[in-house]
Image (cartoon, rainbow, N blue to C red):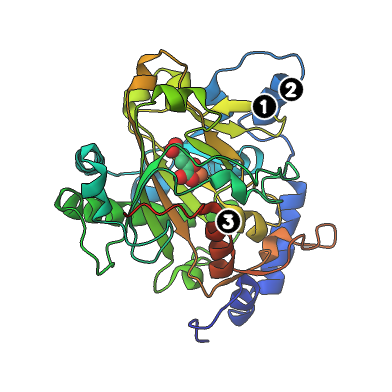
Amino acid sequence: MAVSSALSGRDYLAAHGVQEALAAAVSEVLRTRPAKPIMGICDILSKCAGDKVKQTTSAVVPIVDISPFVDEAAHADEARRQVAEQWDSAMMHVGFAIITGHGVPPHTISALRDGAMGFFADDLASKNVYNYGPYGNPFGGFTGMGTEAVSRTRDKHGSDGGADHAGALPDLVESFIFKPESPKPKPAVLEEAGAAYYAALLRVLETLHKLTAASLGLPADFFEPFYSPAGHYSLRLAYYPPLSPEAQESSAVRYGEHTDYTGFTILHQDEADVGDLAAGGLQVRLQTGEWHAVPPTAGAFVVNIGDLYEIWTNGRWRSTVHRVMKPPPGSAAASAPRLSIPFFTGPRDEAVIEAMPTCVDEGHPPKYAPVSAGDHLLKKLGVSNVGRATTS
Ligand SMILES: O=C(O)CCC(=O)C(=O)O
Ligand SMILES: [Fe+2]
């Protein structure tokens, strides 16, 4: 069967003649799996909600060593089974995980970080040479402060019922979207390091897809038709300048509360903030409604899912609301820049996303209408852009 047309997961499985047997077997496993995950996250979260027991943040955002899926020959099936179970639990209860054992060499990360810091240190006019349109335009490039107000994209995703942020102030962030395939010029300091990082992160994504297929009882190649010949990828360099007194006083935040729009986001936080939970400012909204820091962790990436995974998993996994707050006034971090690098990985635009067969049964009918991946992304980008020109 050709996979060039929009092909749903259900069609794909049907085409391979395994849908019914697989769906029955796996939904039985999912239904009978103990509600309490092996890492005890439920316990931690309910304590946070109830008697306000202080927990270390790293226990709330699970750390998952994905090396059994990176180097399969060096690990037993049992190791993969355990990781798959941790992954399902993390995505189900938090929607975020901190991954180690990913195999990306430190110099691939530091080379891009160094190049990006060099680029953003330049004056606005020089950066605007690389402005190719609003945030989300197909060429990528630079967009300055005042371009995006991401919390305006809040909708029903994120399982808190949504919140109205229609009048939110623009975010205190500048961005460069690195697209290797873009015909537009890129800053020399980013070109080589960006291409190497992008290629390395695509390998991490491949691993996450294998891990996810194992977690959800899907065939190992389940995601292939959705990401072939290429998914919709965006490598974003997010630069938060030191806070001016006005920015510190205003109600604007570094990046407003939102859910991500598509598939996995693989994020590298600023390692200058390691060890100081308030400095980085990235926070997730837990199921209890409390906000919790996502601790910057040396050598690790933060992975979270976007809205399309919530639809795909029929609400089993959470497209978790998160935000980037300002560091406390007067702190060293408030007068320092922060650079984070999210890599957004969605299915190709034409793909239609609907509940996976393994996440649907009589007790769990589909909760969401099927969506076109590209339409969903465009809708979100349209609301997020506040339209202030950054070229002048
Ligand atoms: O800068 C960060 O740590 C997170 C940014 C973010 O949530 C995003 O770009 O979607
Ligand atoms: Fe995000």
Outermost residue, right side: 363
**Residue type pointed to by label 2:** Ala
Disc 1 and disc 3 in contact, CB within 8 angstroms: no
Callout 3: 10 Å neighbours few (<14), some, many (20+)? some
Q: Which residue lies under the disc numbered 1?
A: 290
Task: Work out whether residue 70 or residue 78 is closer to the camera in this orientation and state it.
Answer: 70
Outermost residue, bottom side: 1
Residue 76 relative to residue 127: left or right? right
As drawn, 83 above or below 357: above
- The image shows residue 307 at horizontal and vertical percentages of 61, 54
Callout 1: 10 Å neighbours few (<14), some, many (20+)? few
Q: Is residue 282 visible?
A: yes
Residue beneath the point at 34% across and 21% down: 335
- Sequence-earlier tag: 1 or 2: 2
Residue beneath the point at 53% across and 83% down: 5
- The image shows residue 183 at horizontal and vertical percentages of 25, 70
Residue 329 relative to residue 361: left or right? left
Q: What is the CA distance from the residue labelled 3 to the residue labelled 2?
A: 33 Å
Q: Is residue 79 visible?
A: no
Task: Work out whether residue 287 or residue 41 is closer to the camera in this orientation and state it.
Answer: 287
- The image shows residue 152 at horizontal and vertical percentages of 61, 48
Q: What is the CA distance from the residue labelled 1 to the residue labelled 3?
A: 26 Å
Residue beneath the point at 54% across and 52% down: 384
Q: Residue 383 carries which label?
A: 3
As drawn, 61 above or below 13: above
Task: Work out whether residue 143 or residue 194 is closer to the camera in this orientation and state it.
Answer: 143
Q: Which residue lies under the disc numbered 2?
A: 49
Question: Nearer the viewer's eye, disc 3 or disc 2?
Answer: 3
Q: Helix, strand, or loop for circle 1?
A: loop
Residue 378 relative to residue 392: left or right? right
Outermost residue, left side: 188
**Residue type pointed to by label 3:** Val
